[in-house]
Image (cartoon, helix red, strand yellow):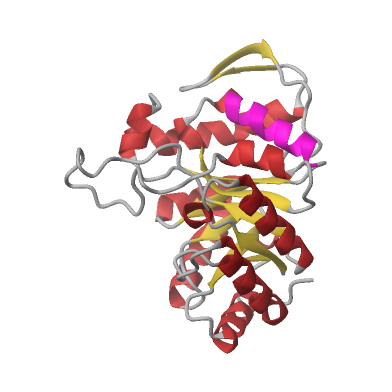
Amino acid sequence: MQIGVVFPQTEIGPDPGAVRAYAEAAVSFGYRHLLTYEHVLGADPRVHQDWSGVYDLSSNFHEPMVLFGWLAAFSPLELVTGILIAPQRPTVLVAKQAAEVDVLSSGGLRLGVGIGWNAVEYEALGQPFSERGRRLEEQIPLLRRLWTEESVTFHGEFDTVNGAGLAPLPVQRPIPIWIGAAAPPALARAGRLADGWFPMAVPGAALDAASAVVHEAARATGRDPASLGMEGRVEWSTGDLDKIGHHAEKWRAAGATHLSANTMGAGCETVDDHIAALESMAPVLGAD
């Protein structure tokens, strides 16, 4: 089980020095990948008075692809989006940016994608919120073609490419695509189309039920469910290392191939606090 970290997007702030210190510390403690959440912009609750989203315009978010291009210059960490909201972006632009990150990181990108939940963001980016599931279904095979073929011609419901291609192509051909999934349609999509998935459930009955949907969809399309990666997450929370280690073992027993340590929302006030938490967790998680 590969151990990584969740980049504390909303708490690390805009200081590049702090971002670098965090990434370099993660490597020094033995973590193997850095996973980041994303939002392009946040809604203003004063305007959207019925707003109930987790994040708003006060929430700090570094843009993942720009961040990854910078990190690739000095960090060996695998770079993971968990997730990039692909349907609110032009597909060929996602393909181009991902290919460039993969080149600069020497094949170190894992592209997690999903449909998101923020209708305000979709509107601002000029994409229909109600069609995001169908759009992602079309995007994934097109992304793989753009990463593996010199010239692509494609005519779909949402995208049209006429005899065009990327240069340079990525190192990984294709780049691994993972899906963040909670609802049954998204779980089935992961089983049919993804190389791996990010559950929104913890080990136990809920994760077992979600895995059953993913695996059934995989088998229905002739895929081996055992070939799919799965990434869990453990929370720093109270700092109870015994509890964190026990939770990690439950993920291992559930078949997780990857696990990320998350320090967001745990009261860390500085980047040094986040780094100290990662250092404490590394031995019990088996980071190496």
Quarter holding the C terminus is bottom right
The answer to whether residue 32 of the structure is visible from this angle is no
Q: Nearer the viewer, residue 247 or 61?
A: 61
Q: Position of residue 55 (x, y in %)?
A: 36, 50
Q: Residue at x 66, y 58 (%)?
A: 22
Residue 118 in magenta? no
Image vertical order of residue 222 relative to residue 87, above or below: below
Quarter holding the N terminus is bottom right
Image vertical order of residue 234 relative to residue 172, above or below: below
> Is residue 94 rendered to the left or right of residue 4?
left
The answer to whether residue 286 of the structure is visible from this angle is yes
> Is residue 195 rendered to the left or right of residue 75?
left
Q: Quadrant of residue 97?
A: top right
Q: Residue at x 71, y 36 (%)?
A: 101
Image vertical order of residue 99 relative to residue 92, above or below: below
Q: Nearer the viewer, residue 94 or 213?
A: 94
Q: Position of residue 178 (x, y in %)?
A: 60, 49
> Is residue 144 rendered to the left or right of residue 159?
right
> Is residue 56 rendered to the left or right of residue 263?
left
Q: Main secondary structure of the magenta part?
A: helix
Direction bottom: furthest residue: 242
Q: Residue at x 65, y 78 (%)?
A: 280
Direction left: furthest residue: 49
Image vertical order of residue 188 relative to residue 170, above or below: below
Q: Position of residue 96 (x, y in %)?
A: 66, 26
Please state the extent of the stretch shown in magenta in the rendering: 93-105
How many labels were placed on the picture?
Answer: 0
